[in-house]
Image (cartoon, grey):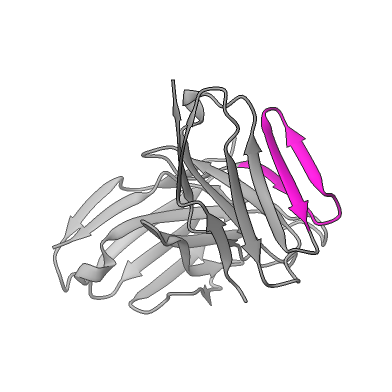
Amino acid sequence: QQQVKQSPQSLIVQKGGIPIINCAYENTAFDYFPWYQQFPGKGPALLIAIRPDVSEKKEGRFTISFNKSAKQFSLHIMDSQPGDSATYFCAATIDNYGQNFVFGPGTRLSVLP
Amino acid sequence: DVKVTQSSRYLVKRTGEKVFLECVQDMDHENMFWYRQDPGLGLRLIYFSYDVKMKEKGDIPEGYSVSREKKERFSLILESASTNQTSMYLCASSSTLSRGGNQPQHFGDGTRLSIL
């Protein structure tokens, strides 16, 4: 119940394409869903996050769509660029003082020029 | 900007050695975490700490211990290193706000540890 499933494992798109990464969870107590972006040789960095009281959140070219009834959420990258090539992790946590996050296994995205 | 600094980027040790990985954060965060990152498995939580001298086991604590003597420093200890502990180790920190305010975790750049 603590797992977060993520797909696909890897993704290749052309510049300007819209890659979509999907995540699913079981634990209905999760109430905070961040996405992290990791470049080679660097630690993950927070990209965008959503709470279940909204169905969509947009920050620049990055959009999270959230479907509470299906317990699924996804990341869309509009007008993708080669600089977006990175590994993306979804995560989930319960709003408690422990901040104990559960991470998906990651998606390696390559955006071709 | 939050800075989480891990003492070594690369480390090579031998089987059976006691290994120390150090992490320091400069934002007075209450929470600190140690993860290991392996291809296809994502980030798995080893230990975390809510406060000085407090620690909690994560998902894969076996073979590891931690120490938090000061708020800014969180150490991961491999008591007797084994080859299956070869991995990328990531440290993270976060602050604790009042209920309803989830805070993101801020990560260091990792220590790539090889056990020969």
Q: Can you name the residue that lies furthest to the bottom here?
A: B62
Report x, y in % for residue A3: 57, 70
Query: Where does the magenta region start and end?
Result: A47-67
Residue extending farthest right? A53
Report whether residue A61 is seen: yes
By secondary structure, the bulk of the magenta-drawn segment is best described as strand
Tell me: residue B63, above or below residue B5. Answer: below
Hey, which quadrant is residue B102 in on the image? bottom right
Quarter the N terminus of chain B occupies: top right
Does residue B30 appear in this view?
no
Using the rendered view, name the quadrant where residue B31 is placed.
Answer: bottom right
Q: Viewer-proximal residue, A96 or A102?
A: A102
Q: Above or below — where is B16 with respect to B28?
A: below
Q: How many labels does the image show?
A: 0
Q: In which quarter of the image is the C terminus of chain B?
A: bottom left
Q: Give yes or no for residue A64 being in the magenta stretch.
A: yes
Q: Quadrant of residue B54?
A: bottom right
In percent of the image, x 21 and y 72: which residue is there? B82
Task: Examine the structure image and report whether residue B103 is included in the region drawn in magenta.
Answer: no
Q: Is residue A92 left or right of residue B82?
A: right
Q: In this view, does A58 lie to the left or right of A62?
A: right
Relative horizontal placement of residue B26, taking residue A98 as reference (left or right):
left
Where is residue A58 shown, x and y percent of the image?
A: 75, 35
Q: Where is residue A54 in the image (x, y as percent from the top left)?
A: 85, 50
